[in-house]
Image (spheres, grey):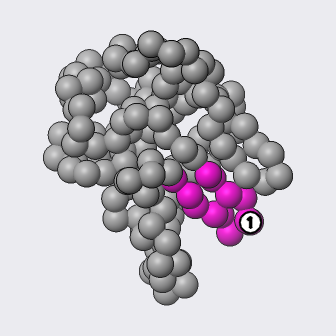
Amino acid sequence: MMQCFNWDTNTLNIKTNTNKTFNFILKGNKTVVCGYSATGKSLLCNIIKRYQNSNNVQTLKKYNLDNIFILDRSNKEKLAEQNHKLIIIDRADLILEKADIDIINSDTDINKYLIFSRKPLGIYLSPNYFANLEVEDNTVRLRYLFNVRGWN
C-alpha cells in the first residue's frame, strides 16, 4: 500500500484513474499554491476525498490516505483537532476566517499544510513557500515562485 503523503520526505504522490500523477515536493510545513483555474487544485482534493470515501477494495489496497485531512466548510470545526496530518485546503480564500488562519499560523510543527488560494491570506510565510502548479507529461508538480537564501 502506498503512503500518499510521506511525512519524512514531505512528498505527496497520488495517481488518478486516468493516469494523471500528482507529485509534490513540499517545502517546510506550509505551502501556498496560487495557481490558475483548471490546473488541478480542486481535482486533487476531489480525488483524495473520493479515495478516502471509497469502498473499492483495489483503491483501499493501493492507497493509504490516513495522514491527509481535506479541510472544507463542512469540517472546519475539526481543524484544531488534527494531529500529524497534511491538511489540504482548497479555495482557502473563500472558506478560511481569521480564527482559522490564527490556528494555521500558530501550528509550527504539529501538522503540515497545502493551501490552495487565489489571494494572500495573512498566513505567515516567506515568498519561498508560494508555488504554482505545472503540468508536464501528465504529471502535476509544484513550481516554487522564489528560492531566495535568507527568506525563511
When the figure is inspected, residue 48 is found, relative to residue 92, above or below; the finding is below
Q: Secondary structure at mark 1?
A: loop
Q: Count of labels shown? A: 1
> Which quarter of the picture shows residue 77?
top left
Q: Which residues are magenta?
A: 12-23
At 48% from the left and 83% from the top, the residue drawn is 61
When the figure is inspected, residue 71 is found, relative to residue 125, above or below; the finding is below
At 26% from the left and 24% from the top, the residue drawn is 105
Give x and y (percent) for residue 10.
44, 48
Within-10-Å neighbours for mark 1: few <14, some 14–19, many 20+: few
- Check if residue 53 falls in the magenta segment: no
Residue 11 in view (yes/no) = yes
Q: Residue furthest left?
A: 81
Give the left or right position of residue 130, taking residue 97 as reference: right
Pick whichever, 108 or 102, lies toward us: 108
The residue singled out by tag 1 in the image is: 18
At 28% from the left and 43% from the top, the residue drawn is 111
Pick whichever, 66 or 92, lies toward us: 66
Give x and y (percent) for residue 142.
62, 37
Residue 79 in view (yes/no) = no
Pick whichever, 91 or 27, lies toward us: 27
Give x and y (percent) for residue 104.
27, 29
Give x and y (percent) for residue 109.
24, 38
Check disc 1 and give the amino acid type: Thr
Q: Residue furthest bottom?
A: 57
Quadrant including the C terminus: top left
At 57% from the left and 46% from the top, the residue drawn is 24
